[in-house]
Image (spheres, grey):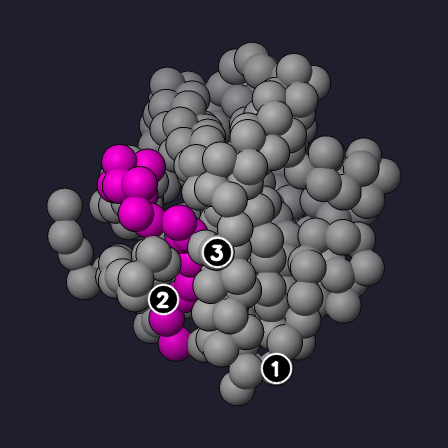
Amino acid sequence: METDEVLVTRDGPIVTLTFNRPEARNALTWNMYERLYQTCEEVDGDDSVRVLVLRGAGGQAFVAGTDIAQFRTFETAEDGLRYERDGERRLGRLERVRKPVIAQIEGYAVGGGFGIAAVSDLRIATPDARFGVPIARTLGNCLSMEAYSRFMDLFGPSRLKDLIFRARLLTAEEAHAAGFVHEIVSADAIEARVRALAAELASHAPITLWVTKEAIRRIQEQRRLGGGEDLIAATYTSADFREGVRAFLEKRPPRWTGR
């Protein structure tokens, strides 16, 4: 599944996947999500690959969420449930990649992009990077229970409520202070820094890295809450969600009714 919307390149033991829709701030289409999943399969199927790097084209965004136009077809509870199940399948696959995953974050990492960054192992960001899930201001949708659990592991319940309730975006400095971002690097230096970090990881014992990564994932998974289908169904069948999608595409503020 090759597409110009996703570019996959290799330099020795390092594979780089570039989300390549800079005109749309690299918002993800279904095909882009699937190419990410396929790349995870390819990386795990090749023992000579030691590191996976994820980045966005254009320097303005890592990934600015899912392409909202795709939500226009949502009509039933099953549409929302399928979207969240598919999203968790993809994020779960990225989380289980046996090699270290580095997210090179320039600009916006919001919505689905925030989720992709969250399941990466190391996050290197530029000073203008922004992070969050502003769904209370934009679409009026929700996250999967696994995604809520994942973000709670990383930020804690208090900070997560502040982030989602206020629909605000964390600055790179705030994300670094929270322990989410590992390093902040200038835009003109980030590519070289990520390359050097990837080369460092590629030189280390691959089994040690995999076992450590998998052990941490399993510990977190034991605490992770699944289910929540009733909450997801209520959200995606609401009039507010349909209004949020229309308002976003019409570039106007949504008119929430709580229904």
Part of the protein shown in magenta: 42-58
Depth check, front residue: 231 or 22: 22
Q: Residues within 10 Å of mark 2 (few under 14, many from 20)?
A: some
Q: Amino acid at mark 1?
A: Ser
In the rendered image, the vertical position of residue 55 relative to residue 89, given as above or below: below
Q: Which residue shows up at 26% across the image and 41% down it? A: 46
Q: Residue furthest right?
A: 158
Specify the amino acid type for callout 2.
Answer: Ala
Q: Which residue is mark 2?
A: 24
Image spot of residue 21 (x, y percent): 31, 66
Disc 3 secondary structure class:
loop
Q: How far, Cα to Cα, is label 1 from label 3?
A: 25 Å
Q: Which residue is mark 3?
A: 203
Look at mark 1 in the image and give the residue it sits on.
Answer: 186
Q: Secondary structure at mark 2?
A: helix
The quarter of the displayed image where residue 154 is located: top right
Relative side of 57 to 106, left or right: left
Name above or below for residue 139 compared with residue 213.
below
